[in-house]
Image (tube, helix red, strand yellow):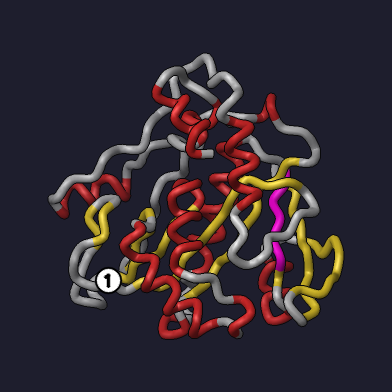
C-alpha cells in the first residue's frame, strides 16, 4: 500500500478521501473518544493481555501497522482525570493516560475473518482505493491538534464530519463489501461503566459515513449476546484458534 498511498500527494483518490472522513469524537462526563497515537500501542497490548488468552494476542508492531494503515477506524476511550496524563487533540501526552477501552475497525469483504497479526486485507482494500479517483465534491479533513486543552476540548465536541454528511463511497461498493470490527475491548479495570456503547456507536457511524451497508465481526462465545444486543446476527460458526467462534453480520441503512 505504501507505494500506492504516495499517489495521494499527486491527485485526490478514494483512499485520500476515505482517510480524511470519520465521525465526531464524542465525550461524556468522565471520558472522551480520541484517535489512538502509535505511542499508545504498548498500553493497548497490555490491556489486550488482560482480556484474552495468548492465542488472541497481537504484538505491538501489528497494532502500529493497523493504526498507520487505517487511522480513522481506530479510536480509544480515555478516562478523564484518572491517570496523571491527558490527550490533547490527536497526540498522546508524555504522561501515561488511562485507556478505558479501544476499537479497531477496517474495510473488508463479507465472509472474511482476520487472522491474528494479519493486516493483508486492509492493505488489499486500501490499495484498490488508491487507484480510484476521489469524489468530485470536497471532503472535510480532520482538524490538526494543538497543545491547548481548551482547543482539544472544542475539537472533541465539534469535530470534522457532520453525521448528516452524505456517504462517501456508496457508488464503489458491492454486496461483498463490509466494515469489519476487528476488536472492541474494554479495560477490565473500567468494565461495567457503559464504555462499550460509545465505541460501538463510533463504528456504526463511521461505516455509514463511508457508505457501507454491512458490518461484520468475529465474536468469542463470551461476547455473543453482547453483539446480538447490537443487532448483529450469526452468519456462521467456526473454529478460531481452538475455540468455537461466530462470524456475525449486521445490515445498516
Residue at 32 percent of width and 42 percent of height: 158
Residue 72, given in percent of the width and then of the height, sits at 46, 46
Where, quadrant-wise, is the N terminus in this rendering?
A: top right
As drawn, the residue found furthest toward the top would be 136
Q: Is residue 227 magenta?
A: no
Q: Nearer the viewer, residue 69 or 247?
A: 69
Is residue 73 placed above or below 196 in the rendered structure?
above
Q: Nearer the viewer, residue 87 or 70?
A: 70
Q: Is residue 233 left or right of residue 229?
A: right
Residue 103, given in percent of the width and then of the height, sits at 51, 61
> How many discs appear?
1
Residue 172, given in percent of the width and then of the height, sits at 69, 27
Figure quadrant of residue 80: bottom left
- Is residue 77 in view? yes
Residue at 60 percent of width and 85 percent of height: 53
Tell me where the magenta segment starts and ends, as one range: 214-218
Q: Nearer the viewer, residue 210 or 163?
A: 210
Figure quadrant of residue 95: bottom left
Q: Secondary structure at mark 1?
A: loop
Residue at 81 percent of width and 75 percent of height: 239
As drawn, the residue found furthest toward the front would be 3
Secondary structure mostly seen in magenta is: strand
Residue at 76 percent of width and 81 percent of height: 243
For disc 1, the marked residue is 97
Figure quadrant of residue 200: bottom right
Amino acid at each position: 500500500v505504501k507505494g500506492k498511498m504516495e499517489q495521494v500527494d499527486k491527485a485526490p483518490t478514494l483512499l485520500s478521501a476515505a482517510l480524511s472522513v470519520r465521525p465526531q469524537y464524542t465525550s461524556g462526563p468522565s471520558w472522551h473518544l480520541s484517535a489512538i497515537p502509535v505511542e499508545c500501542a504498548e498500553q493497548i497490548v497490555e490491556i489486550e493481555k488482560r482480556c484474552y488468552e495468548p492465542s488472541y494476542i497481537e504484538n505491538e508492531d501489528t497494532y502500529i501497522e493497523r493504526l498507520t494503515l487505517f487511522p480513522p477506524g481506530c479510536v480509544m476511550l480515555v478516562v478523564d482525570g484518572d491517570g496523571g496524563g491527558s490527550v490533547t487533540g490527536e497526540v498522546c501526552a508524555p504522561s501515561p493516560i488511562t485507556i478505558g477501552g479501544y476499537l479497531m475497525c477496517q474495510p473488508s469483504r463479507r465472509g472474511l475473518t482476520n487472522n491474528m497479526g494479519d493486516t493483508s486485507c486492509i492493505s488489499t482494500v486500501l490499495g484498490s482505493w488508491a487507484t480510484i479517483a476521489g469524489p468530485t465534491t470536497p471532503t472535510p479533513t480532520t482538524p490538526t491538534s494543538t497543545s491547548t486543552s481548551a482547543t482539544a476540548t472544542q475539537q472533541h465536541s465539534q469535530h470534522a464530519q457532520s453525521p448528516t454528511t452524505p456517504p462517501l463511497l456508496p457508488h464503489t461498493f458491492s454486496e461483498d463489501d463490509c466494515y469489519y470490527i476487528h476488536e472492541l475491548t474494554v479495560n477490565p479495570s473500567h468494565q461495567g461503566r457503559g464504555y462499550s456503547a460509545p465505541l460501538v456507536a463510533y463504528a456504526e457511524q463511521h461505516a455509514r459515513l463511508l457508505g457501507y451497508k454491512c458490518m461484520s465481526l468475529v465474536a468469542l462465545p463470551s461476547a455473543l449476546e453482547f453483539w446480538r444486543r447490537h443487532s448483529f446476527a450469526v452468519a456462521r460458526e467456526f473454529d478460531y484458534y481452538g475455540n468455537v467462534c461466530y462470524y456475525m453480520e449486521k445490515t445498516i441503512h
